Image (spheres, helix red, strand yellow):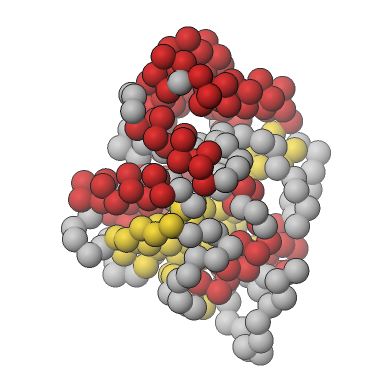
Amino acid sequence: MADDRVPYGGPCGAAEAYDAFHRGRASTPLVARLYALAMGDDHPAEVQASSSCDWPLLGLLVARLRLRPGQRLVDLGCGTGGVGLWLARAHSVHLTGIDISPVAIGLAAARRPYFLPPGRADFRVATMERTGLPDGCADGIVCIDTLGKAHSPMRALLETRRLLKPGGRMAVTTARRHSAPSPWAERAAAVGLELVAEDARPDEPAMWRRLYRLWTDHEEELRRDVGDARTDSMIREARRTLPTLDARRAFLITLRRGSDPSGEPYATA
């Protein structure tokens, strides 16, 4: 899979880096407050996402996933669980969240009672490429701002096809440069999925611009609350990414698994 990513929020590294991010954010309300300021009226406070998830995106996800009560949603790269928990409550479905960070998974599990009754959600530490979940267990899959950070995005897409039931849908956020054509019909076909929709998110780059500027404006407070190492990482990311945002176009991609008459597995490379 060609890498058409324009870098954006979150560290790209081992589980320890994600652990540090989530541990630091949980220790202070400052980071959440800066996300809220960056999103303004579009900020879904209950979700507490460390991503670009806003109210318009939540509406699109509901419309595109089309889940029915009692079905199962898998949230890949779930972080602290807010997006998946919100969607599971909205659709009255069961939720399985997958993340590489044990700290994030612990925080997600602690938030579960605020959204869903007992037995409706579980969270586990795994990678997007190897979830450990059974074949055809998912009626829907959501992947917000994380597919491009997988060690192998193509293998992660193949894993989503394995997990989806026939007719199941996956919604994934992505971005590319203004001049780049969409690769998603070809990518979907390569792993045995169908492209259903490609919804533009025109306000997303501006949100990241506001957030990165807030990080740099509040550098001293961040150092006080989350420490020098985490703040250094955030400031580096902001300075590296801000110049790229004018060239960024963001989308929600919806994919669907149809029936596979051959039953043969798709290649993994």
- Left or right: 91 as drawn, with respect to 77: left
Q: Is residue 155 above or below residue 180?
A: below
Q: Quadrant of residue 201?
A: top right
- Left or right: 39 as drawn, with respect to 197: left
**Residue 151 visible somewhere in the drawing:** yes
Q: Nearer the viewer, residue 93 or 20?
A: 20
Indicate the quadrant containing the N terminus: top left, top right, bottom left or bottom right.
bottom right
Q: Nearer the viewer, residue 100 or 205?
A: 100
Total labels drawn: 0
Residue at 55%, 14% (x, y): give it: 216
Indicate the quadrant containing the C terminus: top left, top right, bottom left or bottom right.
bottom right
**Farthest-out residue, bottom:** 262
Q: Is residue 66 above or below residue 79?
A: below
Q: Quadrant of residue 96?
A: bottom left
Residue 154 point in image, percent of width and height: 68, 61
Q: Is residue 130 above or below residue 135?
A: above
- Left or right: 182 as drawn, with respect to 161: right
Q: Nearer the viewer, residue 195 or 172?
A: 172
Residue 133 point in image, percent of width and height: 45, 71
Residue at 53%, 39% (x, y): give it: 17
Residue 48 point in image, percent of width and height: 36, 36
**Residue 173 visible somewhere in the drawing:** no
Q: Nearer the viewer, residue 57 or 27?
A: 27
Residue at 70%, 37% (x, y): give it: 6
Residue 23 point in image, percent of width and height: 39, 35
